[in-house]
Image (cartoon, coloured by chain):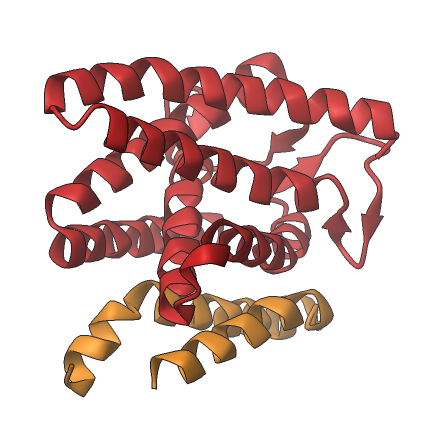
Chain colours: A red, B orange
Amino acid sequence: MNLFLELLTLVCTVLAGLHAWVVRREEGVWLFASLLLLGACRENWVVLEQLLYRYGSLHLKAGAAPAIGVVIWAYSIYAAVVWAETLGHSRAFLALVGVFMMALVGLYEPFLALVGMARWEAGTRVTAGVPWIALIGYPTLAVAFLWLFDGVRRGLPRPPARAAALLVSLPVLAVAHAYGLAQVKRLLGW
Amino acid sequence: VNSESRAFRLLPLLLLAFLVLLGLGIEGVRFHRLLWLPKLPIAVLLLLGARAAR
């Protein structure tokens, strides 16, 4: 069943990427490619450094990390962006994205634990299958990414400079977020 | 905006709604257990999104 879920997630991500390209054209490609880079850096770092959680037996890999872990960030943050835009409150855009990401924790985490695709480290505080720390991790990564992406987009409109800035800053954000979240989890005892 | 393009604009959210239902289906059939409570927030937000898109 894991392979079915992995393939399904990949299909959903491809469709979301297609959506980004059709609806937003060049900007959508920048956004989705940046999200994929963020996910690849973040999940490979989590696996290599053994931070926060462990993956179960999964078939499709993207480097050291399972492909599903890499692409799920892109799909989820993009869905949060679409949802926040649909509601149309531009001033509260980042807050809405954060709220949506927190709600996604309740969809993903209990299910992943139940089917054995991912498990948080021993001692993680959980209520109704929802790890408390994930309620911080999901929204903070999404909001930090969008803040960074928008800053680069506005500050460096020319493609070469923009690509260089994203190639440098996104891995830094991914690693800093994984380490930072692990530290916050330890400090809070969650 | 006609209904087809509106549906396409909401495609990522429609896929997510499908995943919520699929998750409930798998839990019920394979594990005889429904983790519906943690899915409630995302279900509510998706419904709000659908309402706003009308």
Res. A44 visible in picture: no
x, y percentage for residue A37? 33, 27
Horizontal side, residue A15 vs residue A3: left or right: left
Res. B21 visible in picture: yes
* Residue sitting nearer the eye, A60 or A121: A121
- Viewport quadrant of the C terminus of chain A: top right
Horizontal side, residue A19 vs residue A6: left or right: left
Question: Residue at 37% of width from left, 35% of height from top?
Answer: A60
x, y percentage for residue A41? 42, 22
Task: Say above or below: B12 vs A117.
Answer: below
Horizontal side, residue A130 vs residue A187: left or right: left
x, y percentage for residue A62? 36, 27
- Where on the picture, by quarter, is residue A12? bottom left
Question: Residue at 32% of width from left, 48% of height from top?
Answer: A10
* Count of numbered circles on the image: 0
- Where on the picture, by quarter, is residue B13? bottom left
Task: Say above or below: A67 vs A103.
Answer: above
